[in-house]
Each structure stands twice: as C-alpha cells, then as structure tokens.
C-alpha cells in the first residue's frame, strides 16, 4: 500500500524567517505567490494519489528525495519503486488531506503540514484505513516545486 508522504525537515530553514539568500526579506506578494504555488503543488500531489497515477506522483519528487515513513528512512529509489509497483494495482485511493498549512521558509523552500485520512481499496477488495500527520518540504528547482523531504506517521482507523 502506498502511504501518504509527510515531511517536516529543514527546520533550520524556518529560522531564516523567509529571508532571501542576500538577506532581503520576502515581500508579502512574494510570500503569497510561494504559498499559492506550493498549495497548488500539494493539491496536485493529492490529486495524483486519488487518480492512482504513479508517474504523476513520481514527478512531484526531487531526485534527492527521502522521507521517514512511520520512522523508517526511505530514499528516492525505494519510494519510486513502491509507487510504481502499488498505485496501478489499487481499486481506489482517497487520501483526504485536511487542515493544510503552507509555511514559507525562503524564496525556494516551503513546508506543508496537514493530516490525512486514507481510505484504500486494494486489488483484492480489502479496505484499508489510516490517518495521521504529514509534512512535506518543497523546494523550487528551476520553475518546478518538488518534494525534497517528507515525514508521515500512519495510525489505523477502525472501519465504520
């Protein structure tokens, strides 16, 4: 089963207070533009999960991506293999992102925190439910925003 990606790394970046590399503070317009872009990228990631589109999911990951998934560190290659091997086999995937908050860390970095409430139906018609917190650290690479780091904790949710 693919698990929602969560990340919270780059705490040190948050200490910059959203300052540009030359020390100039981001304007409110620059900050709002970053928030909008990263919010859109996160919603695109969620839509790719819902569509069970492995290639669209992979396209959101930076080549130097890594994450802690329930406390286990996994890198880009193993994450991509898991996505490609799992997403196409699922009957449905409802990621249910909620309480999303974008925190601008600088001109080329932002963190997004949210909770997820996954409902997954496997190829065998088993329904799996999990909920938990997620944080994604997005970095701007050229004109694209990519997930550089994630952290997710999954807690079972009882079936209704």
Image (cartoon, rainbow, N blue to C red):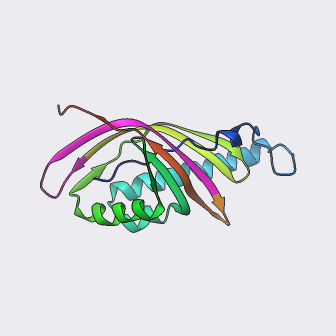
Please identify the quarter of the rendering in which residue 96 is found.
top left
Give the percent coordinates (x, y) of residue 30: 75, 48
Please identify the quarter of the rendering in which residue 104 is found.
top right
| Lateral position of residue 116 relative to residue 61, left or right | left
Q: Is 58 located above or below residue 30 in the figure?
A: below
| Lateral position of residue 96 relative to residue 37, left or right | left
- Please state, as top left, top right, bottom left or bottom right, where the C terminus lies in the image: top left
Q: Name the residue furthest left.
A: 124
Give the percent coordinates (x, y) of residue 107: 74, 51
Can residue 53 be seen in the rendering of this structure? no
Give the percent coordinates (x, y) of residue 108: 70, 54
What residue is shown at x 59% (from left), y 52% (from top)?
A: 138
Q: Nearer the viewer, residue 139 or 25?
A: 139
| Lateral position of residue 78 relative to residue 11, left or right | left
Total marks in image: 0
Q: Most prominent secondary structure in the magenta stretch?
A: strand
What residue is shown at x 55% (from left), y 41% (from top)?
A: 8
Residue 115 inside the magenta-drawn segment: no
Residue 125 inside the magenta-drawn segment: yes
What residue is shown at x 47% (from left), y 56% (from top)?
A: 44
Q: Nearer the viewer, residue 100 or 111?
A: 111
Q: Is 58 located above or below residue 29 in the figure?
A: below
Q: Nearer the viewer, residue 66 or 140?
A: 66
Q: Nearer the viewer, residue 120 or 79?
A: 79
Q: Is 5 located above or below residue 82 in the figure?
A: above
What residue is shown at x 22% (from left), y 63% (from top)?
A: 89
Give the percent coordinates (x, y) of residue 65: 53, 58
| Lateral position of residue 153 relative to residue 85, left or right | right
Can residue 92 be seen in the rendering of this structure? yes
Which segment is the magenta one? 120-139
């Amino acid at each position: 089963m693919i698990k929602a990606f969560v990340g919270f790394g780059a705490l040190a970046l948050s200490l910059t207070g959203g300052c540009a590399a030359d020390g100039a503070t981001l304007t409110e317009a620059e900050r709002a533009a970053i928030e909008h872009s990263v919010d859109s990228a996160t919603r695109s990631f969620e839509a790719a999960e819902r569509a069970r589109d492995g290639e669209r999911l992979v396209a959101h990951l930076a080549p130097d991506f890594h994450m802690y998934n329930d406390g286990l560190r996994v890198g880009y290659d193993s994450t991509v293999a898991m996505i490609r091997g799992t997403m196409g086999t699922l009957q449905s995937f409802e990621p249910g992102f909620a309480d999303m908050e974008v925190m601008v860390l600088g001109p080329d970095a932002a963190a997004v925190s949210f909770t997820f409430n996954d409902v997954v139906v496997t190829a065998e018609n088993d329904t799996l439910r999990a909920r938990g917190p997620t944080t994604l650290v997005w970095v701007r690479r050229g004109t694209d925003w990519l997930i550089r780091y994630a952290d997710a904790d999954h807690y079972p949710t009882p079936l209704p």
